[in-house]
């Protein structure tokens, strides 16, 4: 669809000269991301995190810093492009997308993430291990990025969010392994959604691990421990290959 394609939003039956048409146009904007680099020398694996709705890159970086052994990784926390203030405060948070212009925004976000990964890889010495991690709304971003960027992804970590519906089996097959976390009291990411995601991923040939914990819509210490083991295996397996 052309970038300026549109649709009639409003017609006035009393005036043949009045109607409103929606158009879209490509626009450049700036994104921000945080990078945490330990003192360990040499190329290191890269972990890229995506925050949830109404969170920030700082929120995601703090979340990933609770993972034991994270100092062996270069960690990048990407902030969504759509920023806003939380309620009546001065706290800046962000959202990955809404239903408006969904297909175009997905493409914009994937290009943005690819640019972040390229920039981090140019500035710091990273090895071939790349893991993407998401919480809540950031889970969909992790899966979309993992299946669209040129660089092969070693694995995806997903907590409290589902696999995007538009990703078919051949597309999901680009991901070798996935760790999914769910709180037993999570009313949004339900047990049924978890079971559906596991079925879809396994049908695509993806190795799936699940971790459930006594929590709601959250990333608790129990999941950080599961993530630590997952990342340790990814790091060891890719170094041995």
Image (cartoon, helix red, strand yellow):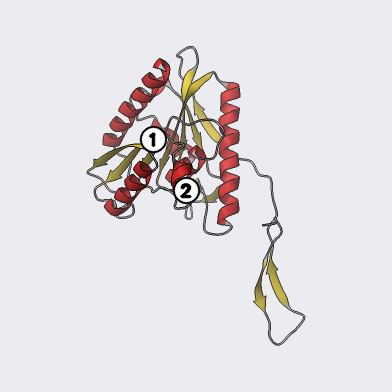
Q: Who is closer to the viewer here, 141 or 220?
A: 141
Q: Residues within 10 Å of mark 1 (few under 14, many from 20)?
A: some
Q: Position of residue 105 (x, y in %)?
A: 58, 51
Quadrant where the C terminus sits is top left
Q: Who is closer to the viewer here, 26 or 85?
A: 26
Can you tell which quarter of the image residue 23 is in?
A: bottom right
Position above or below: 125 against 59 = above
Does residue 142 appear in the picture of this structure?
yes
Left-right relation of 126 to 179? right
Can you tell which quarter of the image residue 120 is in?
A: top right
Query: Farthest residue toward the left?
Result: 214
As helix, strand or loop, the secondary structure at mark 1 comes to helix
Q: Residue at x 52, y 21 (%)?
A: 126
Does residue 37 appear in the picture of this structure?
no
Q: Which residue is mark 2?
A: 167
Query: Farthest residue toward the top?
Result: 41
Q: Which residue is mark 1?
A: 63
* Mark nearer the viewer, 2 or 1: 2
Q: Position of residue 210 (x, y in %)?
A: 29, 39
Position above or below: 20 against 116 = below
As helix, strand or loop, the secondary structure at mark 2 comes to loop
Q: How many marks?
A: 2
Q: Earlier in the sequence, mark 2 or mark 1?
A: 1
Q: Who is closer to the viewer here, 186 or 193?
A: 193
Can you tell which quarter of the image residue 156 is in?
A: top left
Q: Position of residue 223 (x, y in %)?
A: 29, 36
Q: Residues within 10 Å of mark 2 (few under 14, many from 20)?
A: some
Q: Residue at x 41, y 19 (%)?
A: 72
Left-right relation of 13 to 223? right
Left-right relation of 180 to 118? left
Query: Farthest residue toward the right?
Result: 17
């Amino acid at each position: 669809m052309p970038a300026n394609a549109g649709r009639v939003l409003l017609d006035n039956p009393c005036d043949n000269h009045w109607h409103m048409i929606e158009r879209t146009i490509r626009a450049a904007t700036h994104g921000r991301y945080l990078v945490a680099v330990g003192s360990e020398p040499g190329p290191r694996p890269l972990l890229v995190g995506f925050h949830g709705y109404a969170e920030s890159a700082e929120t995601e970086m703090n979340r990933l810093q609770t993972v034991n052994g994270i100092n062996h990784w270069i960690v990048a926390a990407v902030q969504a492009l759509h920023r806003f203030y939380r309620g009546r405060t001065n706290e800046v948070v962000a959202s990955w997308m809404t239903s408006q212009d969904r297909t175009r925004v997905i493409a914009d976000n994937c290009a943005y993430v690819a640019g972040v990964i390229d920039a981090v890889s140019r500035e710091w010495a990273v090895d071939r291990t790349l893991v993407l991690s998401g919480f809540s709304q950031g889970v969909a971003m992790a899966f979309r990025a993992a299946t669209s960027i040129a660089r092969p992804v070693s694995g995806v970590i997903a907590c409290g969010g589902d696999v995007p519906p538009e990703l078919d089996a051949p597309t999901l097959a680009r991901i070798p392994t996935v760790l999914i976390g769910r709180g037993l009291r999570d009313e949004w990411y339900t047990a049924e959604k978890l079971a559906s995601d596991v079925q879809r991923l396994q049908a695509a040939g993806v190795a799936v691990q699940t971790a459930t914990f006594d929590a709601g819509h959250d990333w608790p210490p129990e999941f950080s421990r599961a993530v630590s083991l997952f990342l340790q295996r990814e790091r060891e397996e890719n170094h041995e290959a």
